[in-house]
Amino acid sequence: MRYLPVPTENLEIIQDEIYSLFPSDLMSQSVLHYVTPADFIKKPNLKSYLEKTECINHVEAMAFIVFQPFCVHSIHIDSGSTEYSLNIPIKNCKNTYVNFYQNNGPIEKKLTPNKLTFYKYDPKQCVLIDRAEMSIPHIINVKHPHNVVNENDTVRIAFLIRLKKEFELSSDQKKNAFK
């Protein structure tokens, strides 16, 4: 599974809850910024959503990811043991995408500016095979080659909920997943 849409009827309320804890100094940079999960799980609508999606007991970490206008991230897979991430759009996510690729070349170990490891692919060796618009929440397989594309003239903010290694999609979720 590359991704699974996980819509919610009260997305705007959840977005407002999460955005109320957004560090405004992040607006001027493209950055992955980890936060303390306990601060966010206290938010009632987010907590209810995590319970409903069966993710509440599997939260490994949480982070904001900010992309400046017209930013195209490198094609990569995430490091660590997490396979799935519940990604929630927060601001300006319409017409922004997570693209998925078939890799036909080598992989290169890299560090982000804040010293996090990820594995980068040469775009000349990759073929686009799918894309998910991030205007609604999705569970993303972060072990499949992917990148984020902000085709807008505004800063894009999303909230990532990294799920523990033992997280598995339910049979109902699997039926709705894109293979």
Image (cartoon, grey):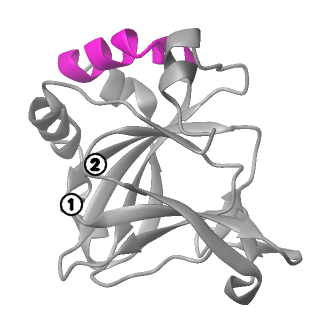
| In this rendering, position of residue 65 left or right of residue 146 | left
Asked whether 29 or 177 is in front, the reply is 177
Please name the residue that numbered disc 2 is placed on.
89
Is 103 situated left or right of 178 in this image?
right
Instruction: Assess whether residue 46 is covered by the magenta stretch.
Output: yes
- Could you tell me which quadrant the C terminus lies in? top right
Q: Disc 2 or 1, which lies upstream in sequence?
A: 2
Residue sitting at x 18%, y 39%: 15
Q: Residue at point 26% right, 56% down? A: 23
Q: Residue at x 71, y 49 (%)?
A: 143
Q: Secondary structure at mark 1?
A: loop
Magenta portion: prevailing SS class: helix
Query: Which x, y percent locates residue 177?
Result: 52, 31
Corner quadrant of residue 83: top right
Residue 135 versus residue 106 in the image, above or below: above
Q: Amino acid at mark 2?
A: Pro
Horizontal side, residue 6 vs residue 121: left or right:
left
Callout 2 environment at 10 Å: few (<14), some (14 to 19), or many (20+)?
Answer: many
The answer to whether any part of residue 116 appears in the image is: no
Q: Which residues are magenta?
A: 44-58
Q: Are discs 2 and 1 less than 8 Å apart at CB?
A: yes
In this rendered view, identify the residue nearer to me: 48 or 169.
Answer: 169
